[in-house]
Image (tube, rainbow, N blue to C red):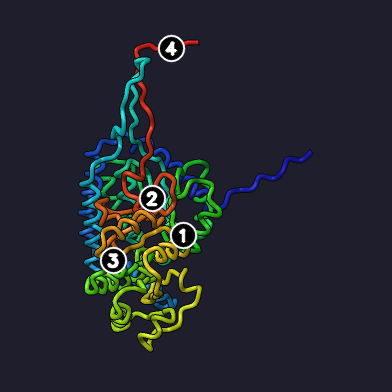
Amino acid sequence: MNKPERIKPTENAQIMHAIGQRARAAAYELALAPTEMKNAALKAATDALGKATPTILVANAKDTQAAKEAGRPAAFVDRLMLDKDRVAGIAKGMEDIAALADPVGAVLAEWTRPSGLAFERVRVPLGVIGIIYESRPNVTADAGALALKAGNAAILRGGSESHHSSQAIHACLVEGLKAAKLPEASIQLVPTTDREAVGLMLSGLDGAIDVIVPRGGKNLVERVQKETRVPVFAHLEGVCHTYVDRDADLDMAVSVVINAKLRRPGICGATETLLVDGAAPSGFLPALTKALLDAGCEVRGDAGAQNVDARVKLATEDDWETEYLDAIIAVKTVDGVDAAITHINRYGTQHTDAIITGNAKTAEHFLRSVDSAIVLHNASTQFADGGEFGFGAEIGIATGKLHARGPVGVDQLTTFKYLVRGTGQVRPK
């Protein structure tokens, strides 16, 4: 009887298998790397990034030009685009990560049992993290640096849209690793833009990958959640809300809402729906609506919003659950804070939601009742960012409830194990 023919792995499969094996070997070394070596790598990478800024901008110009020629939306191009200030911001993020306390080895708890055994619960790295992202070249630096600081190896698969930019930034990370004498395979960038590479990562690369972090649009995250065979840190969408209460300061509300929607409308922390208390003073809804429209934002509202400004388009049911990632906002009048909470818990995506009010009791009720990873009082939803939380940067915003929730920084990129020390104890029969 003939043996079944063995299928030869594709070239991509061979490449990805080798990447996985190198990452696994590097992860063992990184788990034991002293803080000083990791920080030295980050410092050298930061210096390299500064020197390579002109090269990075040339590479990014190729990516942005291709995106424009492909007819990509303005918000997409904005997420992709780098300038000197944004590159400097990426470098600052790496500096901030280097300055963070090293989570690896931190003792989370310790106790002694009547048996005399001494227990410690200690932070340890996750191992190998696969990061799949689309049009944000800054993720190359943020994810690589965070993974390194937490003692993990990283496999980065950027989208074809940001390929040139990611390559230029990754070269700086490798330069940092070399300078600190850490394995170059600690941070690897997948060399191909073929979608097969994504599928191979989702399979776990023969057990090499411990967790996947998708950073991109709804289609990418849905694919990852559907196909992956390893744990995932992810959010599907950022349908974020700002609720303006009857006891809000109107000037504050206008300032916060404009920032929450329009500072950078293409990020996942941008407010997509504005809820206004129906019992608020009569000038609130007109002032908020006018401010948004005058700032160039398209407003899709319910009947109440349409009645205050003829420029408001009629909202449909779909608008309450849409992540626009653009200068578009849905506006709805609600019957007080409880109705706002009900709306958010129904249509939101457990990402980030805010209340604007001067009533401390109402604020506490909202903060405790909204079931989202991040809930704010009198502040813009655009603070949903790891850097703003003091995490240095983030690898993404997790909206699940297991292991990590909210900005995923260095602490969230660790797990723990128990160290148990005895003096010859045996368990009685």
The local secondary structure at tag 1 comes to loop
Q: Which mark is residue 426?
A: 4
Q: Position of residue 237 (x, y in %)?
A: 44, 62
The crowd level at tag 3 (other Cα within 10 Å; few <14, some 14-19, many 20+) is: many
| Residue ID for mark 3 | 356
Is tag 1's residue or tag 3's residue first in the polypeptide sequence? 1
The local secondary structure at tag 3 comes to strand
User: Residue 343: in sight, yes or no?
Assistant: yes
Q: Quadrant of residue 109?
A: top left
The crowd level at tag 1 (other Cα within 10 Å; few <14, some 14-19, many 20+) is: many
Q: Nearer the viewer, mark 3 or mark 2?
A: 3
Disc 1 to disc 2, how far (Cα)?
Answer: 13 Å
Disc 1 to disc 3, how far (Cα)?
Answer: 26 Å
Is tag 4's residue or tag 1's residue first in the polypeptide sequence? 1
Q: Which mark is residue 236?
A: 1
Q: Nearer the viewer, mark 1 or mark 3?
A: 3
Q: Which mark is residue 405?
A: 2
Residue at 34% x, 24% y: name it.
119
